[in-house]
Image: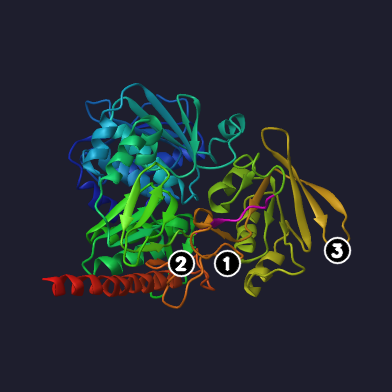
Amino acid sequence: MLDDSLKSQLAAYLEKLQQPIRLHASLDDGDPSRELERLLLDIAALSDKVAYERTDDSDRRPSFAIVREGTDVDVRFAGIPLGHEFTSLVLALLWVGGHPPKVEADVIEQVRAIEGEYRFETYMSLSCQSCPDTVQALNLMSVLNPNIHHVAIDGALFQDEVESREIMSVPTIYLNGEPFDAGRLTVEQVLAKLDTGSVARAAESLAKKDTFDVLVIGGGPAGAAAAIYAARKGIRTGVVAERFGGQVLDTMAIENFVSVSYTEGPKLAAALEQHVREYEVDVMNLQRASRLVPATQPGGVITVELENGASLNSKSVILSTGARWRQMGVPGEEQYRNKGVAYCPHCDGPLYKGKRVAVIGGGNSGVEAAIDLAGIVARVTLIEFDTKLRADEVLQRKLRSLPNVEIVLNGQSTEVLGDGSKVTGLVLKDRASGVARTVELEGIFVQIGLLPNTEWLKGCVALSPRGEIVIDDRGATDVPGVFAAGDATTVPYKQIVIAMGAGSTAALSAFDHLIRTSAPAEASTAAAA
């Protein structure tokens, strides 16, 4: 099941087990069960601290539990956790086996203090790069607290459950049989939903922080680079991030990051955060800025207000809030979001096996999505607003070679149709003739570009007609002491490597600003003495 290289790597990890564990399998006579059993036998053969037995104690088959001997500690997977979930499997083996997780001590204590009975179910797909964070967060909580239980379910293998619960996107999380949330979650985010007082405590803690020299808003490539360059100058640096990694977390394959021939978004995001934390940077995760208050005098303090009610002060600010997927903006889109309207073909594509879908957008992202989906779904209708596709020619040739793809040019989506619970179709108008028609389908994947996360800055810093932060060649905005970098700005090309360079430029410019604004005050103090 596992090749020799993977076995060697896994054996090295299993040496870290501190307590014996057992793999309890629930199987049937199908091929997936046989495949799972081979995987579990391979794992058990790699360590004398791992034992395998078939218990058939679950109605979901194939599934298995990783159980710590002599305890109630366990983690369960319904499916075969390979692909993006292989890391989740390795971490589950280590955590159940007593290897300590890399989590802040106060977070661990907060998880252990949760009272009540919590049974989580996460529906995921093996091609989803967002799912492992959620799976790992809930697995970890189930290891730390015996009142919490979790099973990660491969939606592709348990289609009957996906259909009956009308799950149209992953990850989708249920708690005690009821919908809990959807999308990427961290331990801290789950805690915030379970422990309602945690938000107020976090706000109180943030409000007590001293004034920063540089405060970076955003934790994507631009924000990470800015934080590193600022911290290396030896000045007090902070980062406020809604989710560290930003858009990179939602990126599948990265093949144009100079010197790295191939990597994946979540892996790069983890590396960015690890690099930032090697310096004395105060990382404030899961926080969203809501208002920027400029300094009242040159060299004064700038205030950033957060949605939780806290305020942070800094002598300079770097805005690197990034961008998000642009929506169609038509009736029915919001109503059927995650009920047939999706934005990540890698995550949600497997849920549409054998169904009809549309892809909105003829750029590289849209054409790549259509190519990937064509191998899963029954039919793909790609809809481009312009009179021609804008994707690279090599992608267009591949797309046109696929027999189950229809390309619609000069098409305008005007309404998403549904039956109240899921998408049933899309109203499409020919922009040349004005004639409208209804395309019957079950899924719509929107791939029409990005929208900068700058709404909260309106009236504070200069924005372009597209909502981008206007900057000069030094990354400076029109507000003294406020700089910006990355996809939220007027920089012409939205690329990871460009964002990193822009973040570095903004940090160096902020440092130069601090030197220039502090020099007069220091000179005045010296003269008075």
Q: Tell me how far mark 1 sits from mark 2, CA to CA.
A: 14 Å
Comparing labels 1 and 2, the label whose residue is closer to the camera = 1
Helix, strand or loop for disc 3: loop
- Mark nearer the N terminus (1 vs 3): 3
Residue closer to the observer: 438 or 327: 327
Between the C-alphas of marks 1 and 3, the distance is 30 Å
Tag nearer the camera, 1 or 3: 1
What segment carries the magenta color?
A: 323-329
Q: Quadrant of residue 390?
A: bottom right
Dot 2 lies on which element?
A: loop
| Position of 518 relative to 123 (above/below) | below
Q: Quadrant of residue 336?
A: top right
| Local crowd size for mark 2, using a 10 Å CA cut-off: few (<14), some (14–19), many (≥20) | many
Q: Nearer the viewer, mark 2 or mark 3?
A: 2
Residue 479 at what x, y percent from top left?
Answer: 43, 66
Indicate the secondary structure of the residue bearing disc 1: loop
- The residue at which mark 1 appears reads as 464
Residue at mark 2 to residue at mark 3: CA–CA distance: 37 Å
Instruction: Name the residue beneath numbered marker 2.
Output: 486
| Disc nearer the start of the sequence (2/3) | 3
Q: Is residue 283 left or right of residue 18?
A: right
Query: Does the image show residue 36?
Result: yes
